[in-house]
Image: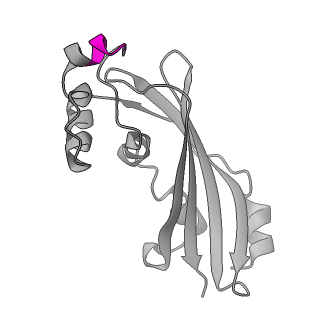
Amino acid sequence: MEIEALREEFMGREYSQFSVLVEKGRIAQFAKSIGSENPLHFDDTVAKQGGYRDIPAPPTFAFTITLDAGQSFNVLEDMGVEKTKAVHGEQGFTYLGDICAGDVITGQQRITDLYDKKNGALIFVVTETLLENQSGDAVANLHSVIVIRNG
């Protein structure tokens, strides 16, 4: 894969919009998996007393939304890259609002950069995914980097 051809073909590409209903049980499962015992993530009464609409998701839960929506391999499949030649290189989050149980989160993944290193041996694909709730309020922007072994 030559970087200039990849840039020409894939730079700015947007993938199908997706929507996911955020369920209390999924938040609790995620909170347990990260070792959280914070009652905010398990008890809607505590959450509402804390000023939330409903049970809030822990901060990195936003990535789980993209996984649940089947977004993980869009880019690799589109580029015809075997999964064994790629690794998840980086993940970043910009938090813009709360994600709570009962929200319907909508997002769309977009390729924002493509570059290579080591004389083309490694290809880096940068994506952004803006997540919005059912009211159209932005709640998170996810920044992800996929590293592909070229050759």
Q: How many marks?
A: 0
> Residue 70: image x %, image y %?
40, 49
Name the quarter where the C terminus is drawn. Answer: bottom right
Rendering quarter of residue 57: top left
Residue 97 in view (yes/no): yes
What's the residue at 69%, 51% (across, down)?
13
Name the residue: 52% across, 15% down. 135
Coordinates of residue 102 in the picture (x, y in percent): 33, 20
Please determine whether, in this image, residue 7 is positioned above or below residue 33: below
Out of 122 and 32, give the one closest to the viewer. 32
Left or right: 43 as drawn, with respect to 98: left
* In the depicted structure, whether residue 143 falls above or below residue 148: above
User: Which residue appears at 65% of the width and 75% of the height?
Assistant: 123
Residue 125 found in image quarter: bottom right
Of 22 and 151, the residue lying toward us? 22
Q: On screen, 118 above or below 3?
A: below
- The figure's colour scheme reads one colour
Q: Residue at x 48, y 18 (%)?
A: 134
* Residue 9 position within the rendered picture, expressed as x and y whole percent measured from the top left: 75, 62
Magenta stretch, main secondary structure, is helix
Q: Tell me the magenta residue range.
A: 47-51
